[in-house]
Image (spheres, rainbow, N blue to C red):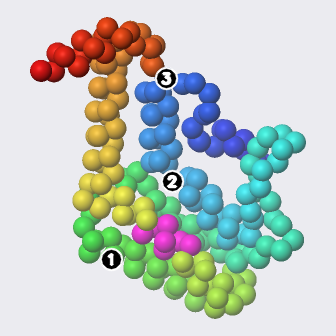
Amino acid sequence: MSESYMDAGYPQQYSVAPSQMQEGLLQYQLDANEIILDIQNSLLGKKQIFNPANNIMEWKKEPDSIQLINEKGMSALLVPLQSRLTKIFVLSDFDDEQIEKMTIEVGNNVVDTLYEHWEEYDVKSIAAASMITSLIVDAVYATLCKAKRHNYLTFLKTTQRIQEIQQLRGRENPSPPGVHSKAGIVDKIFSRR
């Protein structure tokens, strides 16, 4: 069953209060389900295609697409992926050495799993195994890099501060955005001196 493009957690295009939109965007950035879904469908040889008839994005198997692994293998490989693509990891504080160690560990798990179950998971070639490994390891590495030296936590704090400032300014200046009286602008310029 396919889900609506707009229901998939993407920010809405219509007018929303900035704090609500920002909140939704932050939640989307912390949620790794989209990344996992992309990898899962890529492993199964599906592509995301826009269906104009019902205005949604759908995952479909195209005639030219190649399935890298069967369902059973894909399910087995998602375990190490899901264990690292969590909010806990994104909001942590890792240094380069820790990120490298965890990424290598996941890569080794993937390679071992593929080696031990090559035929059972219907992996066609070494090139396919390499692509599978890259898809998973790259996603884990990129996710762990968000946590490097509190990067993502710092980003969230900064975003929260910006929201608070915008809310305070909204209370001070009740006029709609972009509508300023000339006298108000002149007063602000000369009050700085």
**Residue 171 visible in this rendered orientation of the protein:** no
Tell me: residue 103, above or below residue 157: below
Q: What residue type is labelled 2?
A: Ala
Left or right: residue 111 versus residue 101 is right
Sequence-first tag of 3 and 2: 3
Residue displayed at 62% across by 58% down? 37
**Extent of the magenta region:** 135-141
- Going from the N terminus, do you reach mark 2 or mark 1 first? 2
Tell me where residue 187 appears, x and y as whole percent: 24, 12
The residue wearing badge 3 is 17
Q: Residues within 10 Å of mark 1 (few under 14, many from 20)?
A: few
Q: Is residue 150 above or below residue 27?
A: below
Residue pointed to by mark 2 = 32
Choose top left, top right, bottom left or bottom right for residue 16.
Answer: top right
Residue highlighted by disc 1: 101
Q: Quadrant of residue 56?
A: top right
Q: Nearer the viewer, residue 53 or 128?
A: 53
Magenta span: chief secondary structure: helix
> Mark 3 or 1 closer to N-term?
3
The answer to whether residue 182 is seen in the rendering is yes
Q: Is mark 3 on a helix, strand or loop?
A: loop
Residue 188 is situated, as x and y percent measured from the top left of the image, at 24, 16
Callout 3 amino acid? Ala
Look at the numbered disc 1 and give the secondary structure of its residue. helix
Q: In which quarter of the image is residue 66?
A: bottom right
User: Horizontal placement of 52 versus 94: left or right?
Assistant: right
Report whether 93 appears left or right of 31.
Answer: left
Query: What whole-number distance in Å separates the C-alpha atoms at marks 3 and 1?
Result: 42 Å
